[in-house]
Image (spheres, helix red, strand yellow):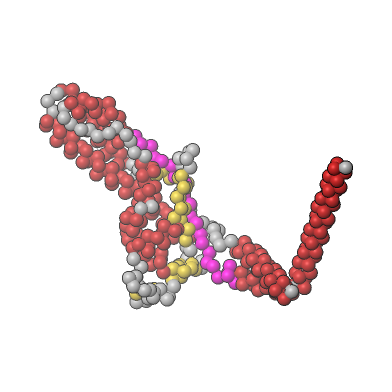
Amino acid sequence: MSNNVNVQLLQQQLLQQQLLQNTQNQDDEIDLAELWRAIWAGKFTIIIISMIFAVASVFFALSKPDIYKASAILSPASSEGGAGGLGALAGQFGGLASMAGINLGGGGGVDKTALALEILKSRSFIETFIAKHDLLIPLMASKNWDMASDTLILNEEMYDKANKKWLREVKAPKTPEPSSWEAYQAFLQLVTVAQDKTTSMVTMDIAFYSPSLAKQWLTWLIQDINEFMREQDQIEAKASIDYLTKQLVNIKVATMETVFYQLIEEQTKNMMLTMVKKEYVLKTIDPAQVPDTKDKPKRALIVVLGTMLGGILSVLIVLIRYFSKK
């Protein structure tokens, strides 16, 4: 008897679950049909809003100035002699030198390419670069480029070219003339530097309104970082030679004199390399060229995304209005 009761209860539970599932399916069908009716009823609203967004996105895309990107491919210059040779000698004879009371420094070398790329993005280097090549006005006051005359179009509300005066309106502590910090941030947004970890090749880009200026600035940037690294190594090599020459006076062991002469020889080689190598740290593989085509904006993509955004918003508006009335 109890078994029959259990079977009946189980059948009732299965029947209730099936009825509940059928009811949910019917509700889903009703909801989808209702959504479609709501969208169809507001089709004109959807079309109008989508067209407004499409037209607005066209005007927005056309208002954006063209940006041209100049690129260069570089490779790390070979580090012959120099700090590498000195580091090897210091590691080899460091113990002997310490017995004589002289510290030759560590034997570890420095990756000059990585160091140069970090210096390239530093504030002091970029500020010096902007001041050296007088880039403040074209960097901060330009708004477009005239292809016919190959000249920059300046924003007259920011800079008065006739009177050579900055006119931009800013709140304190900022001044009408952009500060070196503002110029540094603006220039940093134009530059892109990437190094391939496998091949160690460096790709450097500058994007700007004028394609000729983008190419010129990139060429200057490569030249200046090589010159900066050369000058730093030249100063370091000269200081090392002077130091080692003075320490020779205190040497009383003949073997140590040989070691120091070898160290001086390595630094002399390093000094020679700083004078004869034009591309001291970064060697140009593919030099910067004046770009023929713009890099951005992607106007077609802007129009497509703007139209899609208008369609999505219009559908949401139609559905909200429909269900709020209901």
Q: Residue furthest front?
A: 1
Q: Quadrant of residue 98?
A: top left
Q: Which image quadrant is residue 75 in? A: top left
Q: Nearer the viewer, residue 152 or 98?
A: 98
Counting every numbered tag in the picture gives 0
Is residue 156 shown to the viewer in this render?
yes
Q: Please report the residue visible at 39 percent of the width from the left and 50 percent of the height from the top.
A: 222
In which quadrant is the C terminus drawn? bottom right
Residue placed at 38% from the left, 73% from the top?
A: 170
Image coordinates of residue 136 in percent, x first then y, are 37, 65
x and y percentages locating residue 199 in the rendered image? 48, 38
> Seen in the image, is 224 located left or right of residue 17?
left
Asked whether 145 falls inside the magenta stretch, the response is no
Residue at the spot x=37%, y=64% of the render?
A: 182
In the image, the segment drawn in magenta is: 59-80
Residue 15 at what x, y percent from top left?
A: 85, 52
Q: Check if residue 74 falls in the magenta segment.
A: yes
Name the residue rendered at 34%, 56% in the picture: 123
Q: Is residue 301 left or right of residue 285?
A: right
The N terminus, quarter of image? top right
Note whether 243 is above or below 298 in the view shown.
above
Viewer-proximal residue among 218 and 289: 218
Quarter of the view holding residue 80: top left
Residue 318 appears in view: no
Q: Is residue 79 left or right of residue 190?
A: left
Residue 23, image x, y percentages = 81, 59
